[in-house]
Amino acid sequence: MIHIRNDFNNPPEKLLSENCQKLIERSLIEKKKQSSSNNYYGDPNVVNQLRKLSQDKCSYCEVLSHGGFHVDHYRPLSSVKMIPTHKGYYWLSCEWSNLIFSCNACNIKKSNQFPIENEFLRVNEPSGDWRADSAQYKMEMPLIIHPQMDHPSEHMTFLPNGMVRDLTKKGQYTIDVCGLNRKDLINKRLKAINEIINLLYSQIKMFIEKEYDGKQLRTALCVVFSLLDRRSSSENEFSRLHWIFQAEFEIFIKDFIPETKALQLVIDAFRWFSVKKSKKIQLKSMFE
């Protein structure tokens, strides 16, 4: 999960249309979600704008969109799990700050769950500012990360075994509610990690078998490091995982490259690559 920038002041035109406003008014009168609301939040232009914001990835698990994606409502519309008296946040069906681009699996797992820290401050009726960053909704202290408001890196991190580990209570609830440690996700993340590890190990093997000298080895390893760096760019699948891989490089590789000498060669080359990259970034910033 990564932070997604969204301008809550600039919703798609479909959500500002006269018909959409009439639907919201009807929802307020009947005090329930309108079945036709999907014609607005599910409008292709709205969905495509959300898709673009999330860079064609699930906003919760970072899986690339390959069909089966949905518009998730951060605050559920029809009911709230474990709160039988709550009718759901039906008035937020077309609220731009309540719409999240989500894969089918995360959307189903999350469903109508919406745990908050301050249950006695849960909003039960529409009033005031409906934006997710308004005071009344912030006071609920949601226990699910809002990708467009929160910074997920403050609440969770990734491990070399492909799992997500919580750093805060909010991170813990988000992992559980969205199922971010479901088996298929762990396997996909582990596959991504192993792809880099196997590439590194194959270069080390060439050196051990004397097909590379030291300089050739460093050059070959830097090609792999560059691949890892590119995969940490936000438009790529599991970009945050790859960023953590770089940030905690030695932790990620130590159990996969057991030979002490080979491990040290990789670590030294990565440190050299990181210094060169840092100098390149500094030089670039001087001329911007």
Image (tube, grey):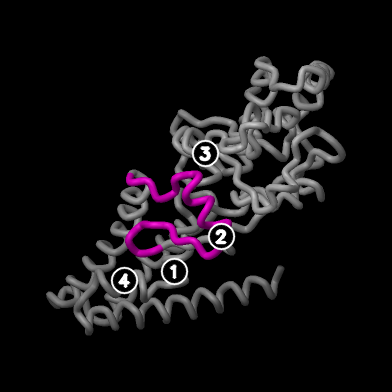
Q: Earlier in the sequence, mark 2 or mark 3?
A: 3
- Residue 4 in sight from this viewpoint: no
Q: Earlier in the sequence, mark 2 or mark 1?
A: 2
Instruction: Bin the neighbour count of mark 1 within 10 Å (Cα to Cα): few under 14, some 14-19, many 20 and up.
Output: some
Q: Which residue is mark 2?
A: 169
**Tag 1 secondary structure:** helix
**Tag 3 secondary structure:** helix
Q: Which residue is mark 4?
A: 253
Q: In the image, is residue 241 part of the stretch drawn in magenta? A: no
Q: Which residue is mark 1?
A: 246
Q: Give above or below for 34 relative to 281.
A: above
Left or right for 281, reference 232: right
Task: Point out the stretch of residues depicted in magenta.
Answer: 159-183
Quarter holding residue 283: bottom right
Q: Nearer the viewer, residue 266 or 78?
A: 78
Specify the amino acid type for callout 1: Gln
Per the model, the C-alpha gap separating discs 1 and 3 is 30 Å
Instruction: Bin the neighbour count of mark 2 within 10 Å (Cα to Cα): few under 14, some 14-19, many 20 and up.
Output: some
Percent position of residue 253, x then y: 31, 71
* Mark 4 or 2: the one toward you: 2
Residue at the far right in the pictured view: 128
Q: Give above or below for 204 relative to 199.
A: below
Per the model, the C-alpha gap separating discs 4 and 3 is 33 Å
Q: Mark 1–mark 4 contact, CB under 8 Å?
A: no
Q: Which residue is mark 3?
A: 110
Per the model, the C-alpha gap separating discs 4 and 2 is 28 Å
Q: Which mark is residue 67?
A: none
What residue is shown at x 39% (from left), y 72% (from top)? 249
